Image: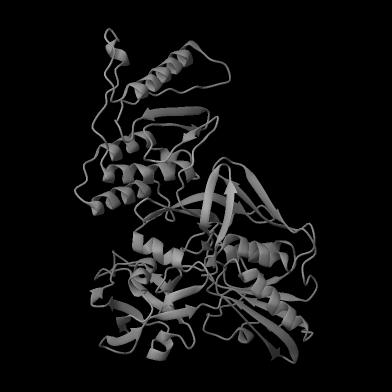
Amino acid sequence: GGVGGVGGVGVGWPAVYRSMDAGNMMSSGLTLHGGMAQSFLFKRSMSLCRPTAARMLLTSDEPMMLESSRRTGTRAQRAFCPVHGSCSLLAGSTDGAFPSRKSIHRSFANLVAVAALVLCNQQAPQGLPSLLLPACAKELTSEQRLAVEAWKVTDREYVDRTFSGQDWFARRQKMAQRKYAERTDTYDEIREMLASLGDRYTRFLTPAMYDALFSSATGDVIGIGVELKTIEGDTKASPPQPMRVLISSVVPDGPADKSGVLPDDVIVDVDGVAMEGLSAEEVAAKVRGPAGSRLRLGIARPGQSEPVVLVIERKDVKLAAVTSRAASVGGKKVGLIQIKQFSTSTAADVAAALDSLLAQKPQALVIDLRGNTGGYFTGGVDVARLFLPQGSAITYVTDRTLAEVAYTTYSDGRDTTTPLLLLVDSRTASASEILASALQDNGRATVVGSTTYGKAVIQTVSALSDGSGVVVTTARYETPKRTNINLSGIKPDVEKECPSKVDATQCLPSSF
């Protein structure tokens, strides 16, 4: 999102995996970590229902749904008819381990709500007390169903179960009752719902944005071969500065490179449509398209008063996340590995590069993470395993249920002894920070550069029924020494300003 993006397809370097967990089918999924570009888990909705003690999840086209959302010390329950009727909501909460008269009354109220569901759209029997008659409304429209679907995904996944202290179920009722004139109104309502959580990483994706992100799952994309970066605007400036998107890097020999696109070019328009105020993901969605199609790109270039207009043909572009080389620094043979983003193939690529470099017997290794905004969560974990001995802690992840998962090494890594340096900067984020903190906390590497971005949360990307999606923060993580680096970042062992444009060999400390 805000820090890094892959032009023409989306943001980040995702990778595909398949798994089944807790009765939910996860298909074509990906977990991404990245600065303002998130750490994600893709889910495609499947028509699967699995009743549990806490909740019965049904797809939005089922006639009724019972949900129970646990909070600290309480349980809030709601019942409604999302399609065949919208029944009045009867709430109950139970505190403590033993039922009180109050809780029994609430339990009875919930029983009445269930009975109301059965009676929705049916003629009430004669003599039935009016108390038991459900207040059924008309069938939900497709827009209302989509809005409720987005609420349901957020309710299921969001890490903060207080939902920023708001009446979360009242918001669902509001979304289900609102009349939407068109799809854009529904999208605006979903955006408002997500914004109410106060989480900068939880957000909405249009179908084009979701497609752009998902299409980059293997690193093979159809676009022009650029990486995009969002430059936040300043509304308080005079005149106000809108959000802009610039090209942070260009894929060598890609369509953009061959057409003369340069790093730091700012994208002004795409096919005549102004890009001012859009994020990197939104611009990437505009840039990508069918292979062989042409794109008119208007860019503002530093030092030039007039925009530069280029016509570029979209092609398949292979995004190389890992590059390596050997170099001589101060008379020492050094192996350099640069990781631009993390995907499911990153660990294998780094392992191959490491094997090649170790065969040349280097005196030290350098991993360049400058500008790496993250990507696939497990990619960062698996790369750390290449350099750590057996039994080393890598990270601790806590999900919305407060369950903790410890990620450790299962065996000795490929190289646990060669002196190792990590180069980082203010854009080094998320999965990169998992790698950096794991190697730093375990005393395996010396971290050189400036304080990192500071993103210690993980997001899930879930597709909605119309092809759009929601990005929801689902977990938090800590370093091996139990440090929460969120918003504070990792402090380097050796402070040294070294912009990503500078060659890595120039960034090594004098004592190296």
- Using the image, determine if residue 455 lies above or below residue 22: below
Q: Residue at x 26, y 9 (%)?
A: 126
Q: Position of residue 428 (x, y in %)?
A: 55, 69
508 relative to 286 in the view: left or right: right
- Using the image, determine if residue 195 lies above or below residue 121: below
**Applied colour scheme:** one colour
230 relative to 481 in the view: left or right: left
Q: Is residue 167 visible?
A: no
Give the residue at the far left of this rendering. 181
- Using the image, determine if residue 179 lies above or below residue 12: above
Q: Residue at x 49, y 38 (%)?
A: 49
Q: Position of residue 80 (x, y in %)?
A: 35, 30
Q: Residue at x 34, y 31 (%)?
A: 81
Mark count: 0
Q: Residue at x 26, y 68 (%)?
A: 240
Q: Is residue 193 visible?
A: yes
* Residue 416 found in image quarter: bottom right
Which is more toward the observer, 400 or 353?
353
Q: Quadrant of the C terminus?
A: bottom right
Q: Position of residue 306 (x, y in %)?
A: 25, 88
- Using the image, determine if residue 335 lies above or below residue 448: below
Q: Position of residue 67 (x, y in %)?
A: 44, 32
Give the residue at the far top of this rendering. 127
Q: Quadrant of the N terminus?
A: bottom left
* Residue 6 found in image quarter: bottom left
Which is more toward the observer, 286 or 70?
286
264 relative to 34 in the view: left or right: left
